[in-house]
Amino acid sequence: MSAIGEPFSEGASLAHRLDPRGKVVVAALFAVLMAVAQTYVATLAGLALALICLALARLPLKKVVARLLVVNSFIFFLWVVLPLTYPGEVIWRFGPLAVSRQGLIYTGLITLKSNAIIIALIALVATVPVVTLGQALHNLRLPDKLCHLLLFTYRYLYVFEQEYHRLVQAIKIRGFQPRTNLHTYRTYAYLAAMLLVRSYDRADRVFQAMLCRGFHGVFYSLRTFSWQRRDGVFMVASMLVLMTLGYLEWRMPSLPVRI
């Protein structure tokens, strides 16, 4: 059991049946390409590609929208700040405040890029269980420490969450009621410090237990990944599409709206 939910990891769609190693590689390349994109044509094409992947994954729409709302709630602050602070041609004035055309274009581009990346990650990476994802990263020759960090974080966030709830219940039993005073702030500080101390103590005990069982930095898995024909087709098609996006970005500067 974990505090990290995996609502998209179970399913029978094409996205769920693909080899996780290929999905991780494609998702990483797509995210990098979208992050450096500076044209609307390439960004809109990338967003369309991400939506196609999402449709193929056949994920619950309500849960996908809920996660997109969380991301876009942060992007909303960019719409409040950037158009007013980004230098460029002024198109609206509200007293001392001026909205620039370049600021609106830049903020819109960031919004499209962010949503394209998140949708692609949901469709390709969130459809992989976290444990399987760690094994796939290990098979891709990523550093062992990074894979271990992912797996331990996934496992022990739930443990730390339970510890936090026990501490909160303990202070409530002692009559604690949060208020805006120094006692409340001090209590919350003690709570955070105690959680860190107990987390460190538990981590040390887990590490010592692993050493007693012969752990030497390698997690062995009974699962073996098999590369099938559909995975090869997916990789070839994905590389062609990504190269097309790169072509739209770098070789057709007259089509996009540039900053």
Image (cartoon, rainbow, N blue to C red):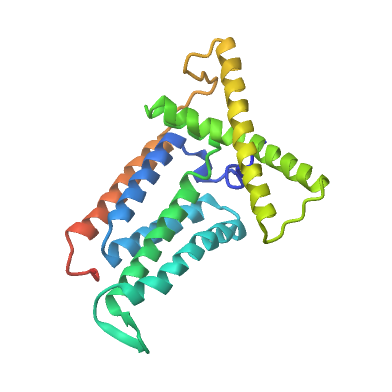
The x and y percentages for residue 79 are 41, 72
Tell me which residue sits at (30%, 45%) in the image.
239
For the C terminus, the image quarter is: bottom left
Q: Is residue 222 above or below residue 41?
A: above
The x and y percentages for residue 3 are 63, 42
Residue 19: in sight, yes or no?
A: no
Residue 59: in sight, yes or no?
A: yes
The x and y percentages for residue 26 are 37, 43
Quadrant in the picture for residue 92: bottom left
The x and y percentages for residue 245 are 28, 55
Tell me which residue sits at (44%, 52%) in the image.
120
For the N terminus, the image quarter is: top right
Viewer-nearest residue: 47 or 193: 193
Viewer-nearest residue: 33 or 227: 33
Quadrant in the picture for residue 11: top right
Tell me which residue sits at (53%, 14%) in the image.
215
